[in-house]
Image (cartoon, rainbow, N blue to C red):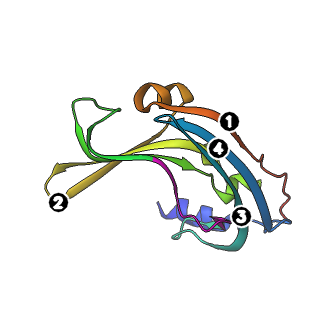
């Protein structure tokens, strides 16, 4: 184990990005219960620093937030409903929300991943034992949104990531 930690730390720090700030507009328009919702906002991304990752090497840290100041774009939430993931379970809370993506994705950081792009996610909160809360989360397709929740996506587009360099 020590050899792995030493070799990871020995790889050196990742290089800082050439482009340190970016703004990425998105648009989401959907229908729920006969009402149309239209959301336009901008994901703001800023490079923060290169820092140690708990002794496992170094990583680039980024900040991302919505220009509107909104913390989370919740599409639907409910309590005490059956699970979509495990229909025999009753969840204390479920939520469908727009996960606007992470700065690593938008800013072209090669340490980011495809799963950090914008997606509509579903999260379930449930308890197996008293005072023990669990969460399950998964991205949803447009077909799943309509089948399970009656949410119809009318229009959805978001900015593509930039091509950044690291020097």
Residue 43 image position (x, y, % from top left): 69, 59
Tell whether 118 sits left or right of 141: right
Residue 147, by quadrant, is top left
Q: Which residue is mark 3?
A: 44
Residue in the image at 29% along x and 51% along y: 134
Give the Cα separation between the discs numbered 3 and 4.
17 Å
Q: Earlier in the sequence, mark 3 or mark 2?
A: 3
Q: Earlier in the sequence, mark 3 or mark 4?
A: 4
Residue in the image at 73% along x and 65% along y: 14
Q: Which residue is mark 4?
A: 28
Q: Which residues are the magenta region?
A: 62-75
Residue 70 image position (x, y, % from top left): 57, 64
- Please state the total of marks drawn on the protein image: 4
Dividing the image into 4 quarters, which one contains the C terminus? bottom right
Q: Which residue is mark 1?
A: 155
The reply to whether callout 4 and callout 1 are in contact (CB within 8 Å) is: yes
Q: Which mark is residue 163?
A: none
Q: Is residue 25 visible to us here?
A: yes
- 88 versus 90 height, above or below: above
Q: Residues within 10 Å of mark 4 (few under 14, many from 20)?
A: some
Name the residue furthest left: 130
Q: Which residue is mark 2?
A: 131
Q: Earlier in the sequence, mark 1 or mark 2?
A: 2
Q: Nearer the viewer, mark 3 or mark 1?
A: 1
Residue 7 image position (x, y, % from top left): 61, 62
Q: Earlier in the sequence, mark 4 or mark 1?
A: 4
Task: Determine the secondary structure under disc 2.
Answer: loop
């Amino acid at each position: 184990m020590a050899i792995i930690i030493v070799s990871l730390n020995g790889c050196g720090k990742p290089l800082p990005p050439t482009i340190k700030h970016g703004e990425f507009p998105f648009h989401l328009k959907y229908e729920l219960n006969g009402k149309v919702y239209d959301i336009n906002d901008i994901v703001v991304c800023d490079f923060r620093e290169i820092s140690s990752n708990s002794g496992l090497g170094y990583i680039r840290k980024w900040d991302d937030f919505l220009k509107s100041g909104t913390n989370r774009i919740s599409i639907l939430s409910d309590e005490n409903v059956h699970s979509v993931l495990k229909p025999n379970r009753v969840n204390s809370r479920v939520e469908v929300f727009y996960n606007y993506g992470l700065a690593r994705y938008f800013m072209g950081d090669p340490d980011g991943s495809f799963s950090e792009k914008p997606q509509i996610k579903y999260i379930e909160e449930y308890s197996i034992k008293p005072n023990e809360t669990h969460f399950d989360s998964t991205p949803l397709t447009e077909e799943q949104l309509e089948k399970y929740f009656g949410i119809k996506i009318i229009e959805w587009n978001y900015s593509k990531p930039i091509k950044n360099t690291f020097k």
